[in-house]
Image: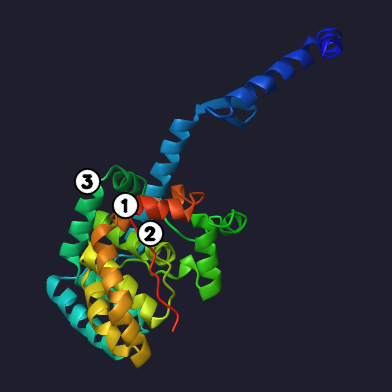
Amino acid sequence: MCRLLKCCCGPSSKTMKMLISLIMARKLCGIYHVCYTWGKTNVIPRRFLAAINNDFKRAKFEEDFLSSHIETTGFQKFLLTVGSAAVSLLDPTRADMIAVMGETAGDSAFRYILQTMQSDSEGQEILRNRPRINSLTVDLEKLRQMPDGTLGRAYIAFLDYNKVTPDSRLTVQFVDDVKLAYVVQRYREVHDLIHTVLGMPTNMLGEVTVKWVEAIQTRLPMCVGGALFGPLRLYPKQRQKYVKYYLPWAIQTGTNCKFLMNIYYEHRWEQPIIELHEELHIKMLEVPKS
């Protein structure tokens, strides 16, 4: 070490300055972000960089909202609600019609969700930052490398097993208020995460169970409709399990667990899912093997 310092201080003091600069840069890395622009070095506190990034996310969502928003009158919304509800009942696979019904018939529920999120510190942070969940904002490959038992690993396993992608969620079109539009978009994008946290598959039995939990927590009409009418499409054996195990568990979970829209999932990828269950007061469903 002494020889190194002597060497650096000897022929060229410039080398020593560069070495000191590198050491200082490494120490400041956790607090500051160092950028190089046009030959100049700019040091920016990371908290300011995070604020800029969050402002960018908000602006990006507002840009997407304006580009996709379709302005409608109250009467037009009524017609869209009736039409989309009829099509959804005849063909439950029409995700586009279910989405339209959800947007045009759920104004009071949107306001309830917004108010509930505003009353919680984690919910406030979500509303403030307006994060999105898709393949551009979430490093899916990084989630695959996380340890077993973490939320991130469980989520990517859910996506892979069910052959779904976070990019499949439609953009909100018929909600006029940007704050409420984000609430709807957030609900859509965390739906698969709710499946993951609850340990529910994407078959009809799993979907109906999740819809009960979501209906109790969000009061969304489309969730209420799915919870009430979805069981009609269950097979007899599924219906028996549903009535005996899944329905009581869904009602108890939806009533007792923490509001699932208030979870900043992106900050919890590395959290053990068992620990998350304890925090949210979720007891996993256990169905005896028949």
Sort mark 2 into few (<14), some (14-19) or many (20+) by Cα contacts within 10 Å: some
Q: Tell me the kind of residue under disc 2.
A: Asp
Q: x, y (%) of residue 214?
A: 28, 67
Left or right: residue 34 compared with residue 273: right
Which quadrant, please, contains the C terminus?
bottom left
Mark yes or no: residue 175 visible. no
Q: Residue at x 72, y 14 (%)?
A: 17
Q: Which residue is mark 1?
A: 262
Mark 2 against mark 3, which lies toward the viewer?
A: 3
Q: For mark 3, what is the residue?
A: 119
- Could you tell me the amino acid type at mark 1? Asn
Question: How busy is the neighbourhood of tag 1: few (under 14 within 10 Å), some, or many (20 plus)?
Answer: many
Residue 240 x %, y %: 32, 86
User: Which secondary structure lies at badge 2?
Assistant: helix
* Residue at the (29%, 84%) spot, across then down: 231
The answer to which quarter of the image holds residue 25 is top right
> Residue 35's x, y, as percent?
59, 31
| Between marks 2 and 1 in the image, the one whose residue lies nearer the viewer | 1
Judge left or right: residue 247 versus residue 155. left
Could you tell me the amino acid type at mark 3?
Ser
The CA span between labels 2 and 3 is 26 Å
* Residue depicted at x 38% and y 59%: 64
Using the image as rendered, state which of residue 274 and residue 10 is in the foreground. 274
How many marks the image carries: the answer is 3
Picture residue at 28% right of the left edge, 89% below the top? 232
Residue 74 % position (x, y): 13, 71
Q: Which mark is residue 109?
A: none
Measure how far apart labels 3 and 1 are at the Cα level: 10 Å
Tell me the element at label 3: loop
Q: Which residue is mark 2?
A: 64
Eyeballing the image, is 32 above or below 107?
A: above
Residue 148 in view of the camera: yes
